[in-house]
Amino acid sequence: MTLLRGRRAGLEVALAGRELGEAFDELEARLAERPGFYRGTSAVANFGTTRPASDDLIRLGRLLGDAGIELRAIAGSPDVGEIAMACGLAFEAVAAPASDAHELDRRRALRPRRDAKLSDSARSLVADFAGARADIADRRRRGEASVPRVDPAAAPSPGAAPSPLEFGPALHLVETPSSTLYHAGTLRGGQALHHDGNVVVVGDVNPGAELVATGDVLVFGRLAGVAHAGAQGDENARVYALDLDATQLRIATFIAADGDNAGAGGAEAAVVRDGRIVVVALDQLGQLERGVTQS
């Protein structure tokens, strides 16, 4: 179970069904791995039906506060709400889950029943199937195979007409191109988009947010978080942004930290050249690809 995950308005600390002492130790270790990464964000702690003590909330608030995260609300069953109110925190009610079997039976009972009805075209096929069955029976009585078999080793004689069972050229496997994930809106700190393909964001990517794509990363706004293009090793992948000010850029296995990727401002692209990541103005990208060096 993921302990810390992004949600629409920040972070969620998933504590439902967990032993709180162990969960807090795990949370403390995870926050220590990336100090400052979540700073400036807010979080909702989801306890589910687990009832925390006041000391638990105090420890959780301290852990998050040390990492620069504001504990904004508590989520859980109604009795957890009493503790949240006593500590001056907002509360989000979470319905207690019903048993899986009971819930499945309830949904099946509510599902509308539909009687299958054949269209006129479908009814006309019934006679065709009956005729096909009769034809197969006649073949078997004559000792013929009901389905003709083809010997792939038997080559046709020169000039012979093609067999009706030859369906043209051999089939080839065609790889489908990678898909593109389109996200309209700002990504706040703690939020992440991971996609097998290209990632397009129409909005800003704030510090602490993360974009990971096996293809290109395009940001129609300010890119101030972490961007990783070509995450499966594609060195030809690129990172584009209208305002490229990333905390960290990655393309395949190459990394450029904050300060290494500073450009001249405006629309820019980050590409791999000569074993390192370089940032170039978008209108000069074609010259870079043609090997033209600007003096």
Image (cartoon, helix red, strand yellow):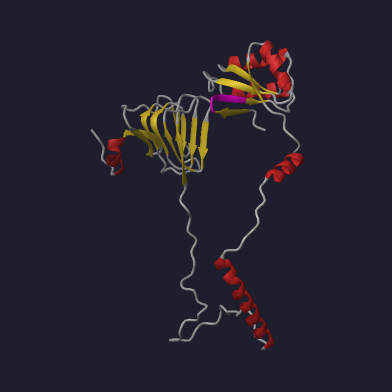
Q: Residue at x 65, y 56 (%)?
A: 115
Q: Quadrant of residue 139?
A: bottom right
Side of 54 relative to 246 (left or right): right
- Which residues fall within the magenta stretch? 8-12
Q: Residue at x 76, y 40 (%)?
A: 102
Extreme-bottom residue of the structure = 142
Q: Position of residue 245 (x, y in %)?
A: 39, 26
Q: Residue at x 71, y 15 (%)?
A: 82
Q: Residue at x 51, y 82 (%)?
A: 155
Q: Position of residue 275 (x, y in %)?
A: 40, 38
Side of 255 relative to 55 (left or right): left
Q: Say if 36 sits above or below 149 in the image.
A: above
Image quarter in which the N terminus is found: top right
Q: Position of residue 56 (x, y in %)?
A: 71, 16
Q: Say if 78 sits above or below 102 in the image.
A: above
Q: Is residue 59 magenta?
A: no
Image quarter in which the C terminus is found: top left
* Pick the front one: 22 or 58: 58
Extreme-left residue of the structure = 295
Q: Position of residue 94 (x, y in %)?
A: 67, 26
Q: Say if 194 sits above or below 12 in the image.
A: below
* Pick the front one: 13 or 26: 13
* Pick the front one: 57 or 246: 57
Side of 270 relative to 132 (left or right): left
Q: Say if 151 sits above or below 194 in the image.
A: below
Q: Is residue 250 visible?
A: no
Side of 18 relative to 231 (left or right): right
Q: Is residue 170 visible?
A: yes
- Judged by its main secondary structure, the magenta piece is strand
